[in-house]
């Protein structure tokens, strides 16, 4: 099954702060990029491990060089995501914001958390779970009867969405104590477990779930291929459902608008997938691409870049015209990219073969 496009409307209400706080978010991301650029050079591809020439980047953004892998095509930042970098990034709680998680875990939970949680669940995660169910039905499965494990479960959104659709057995595993606690506050009795980062490989090896989901997680792991290899060797795991970020036009827009906060190729995204690198993973490790849903945020990134840039000099009338000229057409524009499989992310159901 192939599916393309999704209306950006519901997502926009979760992203207003990208417009309102451009300058402060931009400077935070510059700091992260500077820290990343102080790490040792990456010598091999993050996915296929073949040698890459980090001394000769294909392009540079925020003073970080990037190269395409000659073997699998993955886009690699030229520095390593060392333990030090990962600790810096995720204890700052900045990494999750990239994946639209706006909750500030450092503060007391606020009264409107429940409303925001339910809205994110409904608009962002229920559609993902519905797609998983539809894709599994297409494989002849009865989705509600399968067991699910969600690795990198965050605040439990994917677990909650699968349960809402009727899945009985869903477990989640998450490294952030704050997020686990928040997930449990929002969902009484949810089976979400706090783990240390290295435990993810052990869980991949020993889970008896037939379906493993990783929503915006694989790209953040220090050894993404190892976890996929482990899942492929686990005889109980039949399907892996991934959301991963792709090298897409968003990156070109980020290169073109250096004064606008980059969303896609920055911070925890030190490398981006391409169809060829997903195919490499499948062929090497024994997976088959079964169902895919292509939708991206490239065009909303472009709209934001334009609006943030012109609002310095444009009056309200021009900003309104800007709405008419591009913002109102954003779904249609994005659909063109999605149908060409050029979106900034892919949801894919892989079958272990
Ligand atoms: Zn590679």
Image: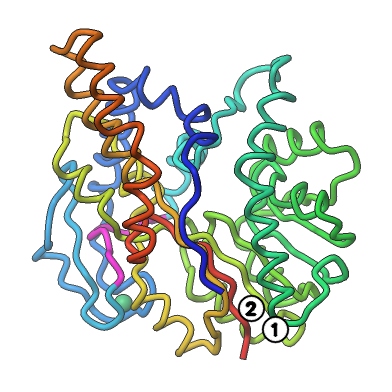
Foreground residue among 49 and 334: 334
Q: CA distance from mark 2 to mark 1?
A: 5 Å
Seen at 52% across and 54% down, the residue is 216
Region of the chain picked out in magenta, as a range: 74-82
- Image location of residue 325, percent across then percent down: 24, 30
The image quadrant where one finds the C terminus is bottom right
The quadrant of the picture showing ligand 1 is bottom left
Looking at the image, residue 137 sits to the left or right of residue 12; the answer is right
77 inside magenta stretch: yes
Reply above or below: 110 against 322: above
Seen at 11% across and 65% down, the residue is 55
Reply above or below: 189 against 119: below
Task: Classify mark 1: residues with Cα within 10 Å, few (<14), some (14-19) or many (20+).
Answer: some
Looking at the image, residue 186 sits to the left or right of residue 70; the answer is right
Foreground residue among 39 and 284: 284
Q: Quadrant of residue 106?
A: top right
Reply above or below: 189 against 114: below
The image quadrant where one finds the N terminus is bottom right
Q: Main secondary structure of the magenta part?
A: loop
């Amino acid at each position: 099954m192939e599916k393309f496009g999704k209306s950006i409307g519901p997502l926009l209400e979760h992203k207003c702060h990208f417009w309102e706080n451009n300058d402060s978010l931009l400077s935070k991301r510059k700091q992260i990029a500077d820290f990343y650029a102080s790490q040792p050079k990456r010598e091999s591809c993050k996915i296929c491990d073949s040698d890459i020439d980090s001394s000769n980047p294909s392009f540079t953004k925020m003073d970080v060089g990037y190269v395409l892998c000659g073997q699998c095509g993955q886009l690699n930042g030229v520095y390593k995501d060392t333990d030090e970098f990962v600790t810096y990034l995720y204890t700052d709680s900045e990494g999750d914001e990239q994946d639209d998680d706006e909750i500030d875990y450092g503060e007391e939970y606020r009264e409107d958390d429940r409303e925001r949680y339910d809205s994110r669940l409904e608009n962002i995660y229920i559609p993902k779970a519905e797609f998983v169910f539809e894709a599994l039905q297409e494989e002849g499965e009865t989705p509600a009867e399968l067991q699910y494990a969600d690795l990198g479960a965050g605040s439990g959104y994917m677990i909650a969405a699968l349960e809402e659709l009727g899945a009985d057995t869903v477990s989640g595993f998450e490294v952030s104590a704050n997020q686990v606690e928040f997930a449990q506050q929002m969902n009484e009795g949810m089976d979400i477990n706090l783990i240390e980062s290295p435990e993810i490989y052990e869980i991949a090896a020993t889970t008896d779930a037939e379906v493993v989901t990783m929503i915006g997680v694989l790209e953040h792991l220090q050894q993404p291929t190892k976890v996929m290899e482990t899942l492929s060797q686990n005889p109980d795991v039949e399907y892996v459902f991934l959301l991963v970020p792709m090298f897409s036009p968003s990156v070109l827009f980020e290169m073109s608008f250096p004064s606008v906060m980059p969303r896609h190729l920055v911070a925890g995204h030190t490398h981006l997938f391409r169809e060829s690198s997903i195919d490499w993973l499948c062929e090497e490790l024994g997976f088959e691409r079964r169902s895919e849903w292509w939708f991206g945020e490239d065009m909303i990134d472009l709209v934001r870049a334009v609006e943030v840039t012109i609002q310095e000099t444009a009056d309200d009338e021009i900003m309104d015209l800007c709405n008419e000229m591009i913002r109102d057409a954003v779904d249609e524009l994005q659909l063109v990219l999605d149908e060409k499989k050029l979106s900034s992310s892919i949801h894919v159901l892989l079958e272990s073969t």
